[in-house]
Image: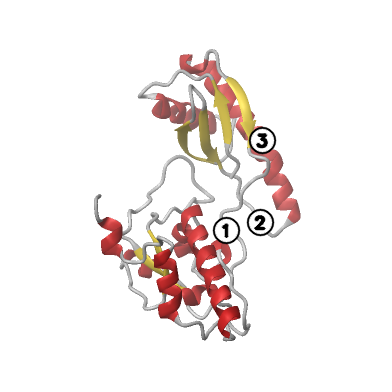
Amino acid sequence: SLHFRIGFVELTFELRRKCAAVLEKACAAGKIGLYGGPWPATFSGRDIYFNVIRTPGNATNPQDWTNAEIQGRRDAWTMFELWKEALPEFKDAYFFTSGPTAGSRESRRIVGDYTLTGDDIRGAKRQDDVVVLGAWRIDRHPKDATGYHDQPIVPPYDISYRTLLPQGVENLWVAGRCHSATSEALASSRVTANSMGMGQAAGTAAAIARATGVDSRSVPMAELQDRLIAADVILDPESAMQGL
């Protein structure tokens, strides 16, 4: 994906629907390829940040990555021109900026001591070694479809400490998008807040291991969880739902 930002757009209630209609027509006419959404977000004033570019490919292949960089920017500019031509809300708009590089939603992942699954997420499976409470929908971006797609809402679910520990390796913690999860589960666990939580858990565990002289698999779970909670990490779904 490549996000981009457009400035000085007239913000209206129907804007997202109208942007989507323009893209649907352009895609049918062969003017653009695959896209998702669009999912716009407003910045200060009349700036809009668009999440819409979708370029399929293998993120571990340099040629595919290069193609994604080129095609993503080409598509972003084409979409801007289409909206500017078709929609009065874009009459005075200008192309502000695009991301410095394309973003990969999924590439290589470790095989850990535990692998998070889609069933774990849908069933809100509890784990004794929970270090992150996930709460994002299963946000899969199909590589062969355009527009909006089903993103089932899920209850808060546990991300196990064991998903950070690669099998057969001691004293290595792997956090974020490359932790141990199925492709379906990663569509939820990969997002920024979850990845930040995994990084905090991995760093805290490494500090405990260093201070106590134990290996990555012998970190006292109660101590790790207590330290995370003391740092305002929410690990209890009941606590997470309070006040909502």
Q: Amino acid at mark 2?
A: Ala
The residue nearer to you, when weighing 78 against 243, is 243
Q: Amino acid at mark 1?
A: Glu
Residue 83 at what x, y percent from top left?
53, 22
Is tag 1's residue or tag 2's residue first in the polypeptide sequence?
2
Q: Is residue 132 left or right of residue 79?
A: left
Residue 56 at what x, y percent from top left?
60, 50
Q: Residue at x 30, y 58 (%)?
A: 240
Q: CA distance from mark 3 to mark 2?
A: 17 Å
Report which residue position mark 1 lands on: 106
Report which residue position mark 3 lands on: 73
10 Å neighbourhood of mark 2: few (<14), some, or many (≥20)?
A: some
Is tag 3's residue or tag 1's residue first in the polypeptide sequence?
3
Callout 1–callout 2 Cβ contact below 8 Å: yes
Q: Residue at x 44, y 53 (%)?
A: 139
10 Å neighbourhood of mark 1: few (<14), some, or many (≥20)?
A: some
